[in-house]
Amino acid sequence: MSHGIANLVDNAIKYSGSPSLIELKLKHTTSEIVIRIRDQGIGITGDKLERVQERFYRAKNASTANDSGRCKRTNTL
């Protein structure tokens, strides 16, 4: 799970301009943990947003690192 969070934060840094604000919020209850990461990056268009959690899906403006789909896979174990 920590690798998935690190990947999301890395993407927030990578695709946000400098300087920019990146917020991390954690909320927990007895049954779940919610982690929110908000940035001021380029965003994801609606047609790509529905595919973003598919394993190995890469947007055209993405880097060459192969972490696509890793966050969803890690966080659903």
Image (cartoon, helix red, strand yellow):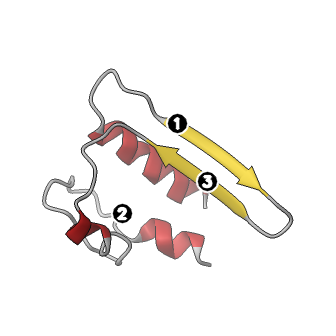
Using residue 63 as the reference point, say whether residue 21 is left or right of it: right
Element type at mark 3: strand
The residue under label 1 is 23
Pointer 3 or 2: first along the chain: 3
Task: Tell which residue pokes out farthest to the top in this image.
Answer: 19
Q: Position of residue 51 (x, y in %)?
A: 30, 75
**What is the C-alpha distance between the residues marked 3 and 2?**
19 Å
The amino acid at mark 1 is Glu
Q: Which mark is residue 35?
A: 3
**What is the C-alpha distance between the residues marked 2 and 1?**
21 Å
Pointer 2 or 1: first along the chain: 1
Q: Position of residue 75 (x, y in %)?
A: 58, 70
The amino acid at mark 2 is Asp
Q: Which residue is painted at 30% across and 36% down in the image?
A: 16
Element type at mark 2: loop
> What crowding class fits label 1: few (fewer than 14 Cα within 10 Å), some (14-19), or many (20 or more)?
few
Element type at mark 1: strand
Using residue 50 as the reference point, say whether residue 72 is left or right of it: right
The amino acid at mark 3 is Ile
The residue under label 2 is 67
**What is the C-alpha distance between the residues marked 1 and 3?**
10 Å
Q: Quadrant of the C terminus?
A: bottom right
Relative height, residue 66 to residue 24 (above, below): below
Q: Which residue is painted at 38% across and 43% down in the image?
A: 12
Relative height, residue 53 to residue 5 (above, below): below
The quarter of the displayed image where residue 45 is located: bottom left
The quarter of the displayed image where residue 50 is located: bottom left
Relative height, residue 31 to residue 3 (above, below): below
The quarter of the displayed image where residue 19 is located: top left
In this figure, what is the number of numbered marks? 3
